[in-house]
Image (cartoon, rainbow, N blue to C red):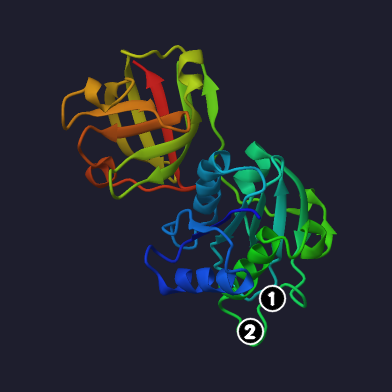
Amino acid sequence: MAHLIIQTDFGTGSASVSAMHGVAAVVDPDLRVDDGNNDVAQFNVLDASESLMYLLPYWPEGTVFVSVVDPGVGTSRRSCVAKLSNGSYIVTPDNGTLTYVKERFGITAVREIDESVNRLSGSQDVHIFHGRDVYAYCGARLAAGIIDFEGVGPEYPVDEIVEAPYIRPEKKPGEVSGMINEAGEHFGLIGTNIPFSWLSESGMEYGDTVRVTVLRDGETVMDAEMPLEKTFGYVPVGSPLVFSSETRTAMMAINQGNATLQYGLGFGPSWKMIIRKV
């Protein structure tokens, strides 16, 4: 029996998440179910994909992840299960949620969920809660071993998986750039998809001063110099810095402050960060 991990944009403490747990318990009372991240940004499939990339390496092979960020719920978008390169699975709408997983982690096969078999009985006339009625139910059946991957439904080409557009990272001597993919409210961390190793490859090392420019749809929102350091304690309280995130990407923050609020930053395909050596 595999772990079942649930992530959604429903919010922590949501009754809807509890209902998904309940469906899994009905499928198999002994199934191990945990929450991953139920605070994915609302309707944001790239944030869902980033969250999955954060979680995937730290759960055992064969884990079944149910990801429900589904602004097109009830429409013609596919409901699918993707089999990953490490033998785990993601149950999700095929709406861009698998973008980073396909590119960075690897998907070996994908199947469309056959709702005539893998849908909660009696839910056929409900069109707005596939997270409960389709994804939690199918994911629980897969994790409990009631069905195997072939039992999900018909296979379709991995090349047909929907990928959401985003700003890809770039590097050149003395400069790296990429998309802001995190602008947290709690600690105010500003994360990017720029590999941190690229800074060194572009001539920037710990102890250097770097210039950070943030653009929103091409317009400058922030432009400031700050140190490149290992962690927060290397700069005074209230001072900004650039450092490596726990996923080894370039991140900007204010020591014991909130860069999201102080600089008025957001995240997603409209937001670009450029880091240059001073």
- Helix, strand or loop status at disc 1: loop
Who's the residue at 23% across and 24% down the image? 233
Who's the residue at 65% across and 72% down the image? 134
Residue 173 seen anywhere in this rendered image of the structure: no
User: Residue 133 versus residue 165: which sits nearer the camera?
Assistant: 133
Residue 32 seen anywhere in this rendered image of the structure: yes
Badge 1: residue crowd in 10 Å (few <14, some 14–19, many ≥20): some
Q: Quick check: 212 above or below 2?
A: above
Q: Position of residue 178 (x, y in %)?
A: 49, 34
User: In which quadrant of the rendered image does the N terminus lie?
Assistant: bottom right
Q: Quick check: 179 above or below 89?
A: above
Residue type, numbered disc 2? Ser
Disc assigned to residue 119: 1
Which residue reaches farthest left? 237
Who's the residue at 68% across and 44% down the image? 102
Q: Quick check: 28 above or below 183?
A: below
Q: Quadrant of residue 211?
A: top left
Contact between marks 1 and 2 (CB within 8 A): the answer is yes
User: Residue 166 versus residue 67: which sits nearer the camera?
Assistant: 67
Disc assigned to residue 123: 2
Badge 2: residue crowd in 10 Å (few <14, some 14–19, many ≥20): few
- Helix, strand or loop status at disc 2: loop
User: In which quadrant of the rendered image does the C terminus lie?
Assistant: top left
Number of numbered labels in the structure image = 2
Q: Quadrant of residue 13?
A: bottom left
Distance (Cα) linking label 1 and label 2:
7 Å
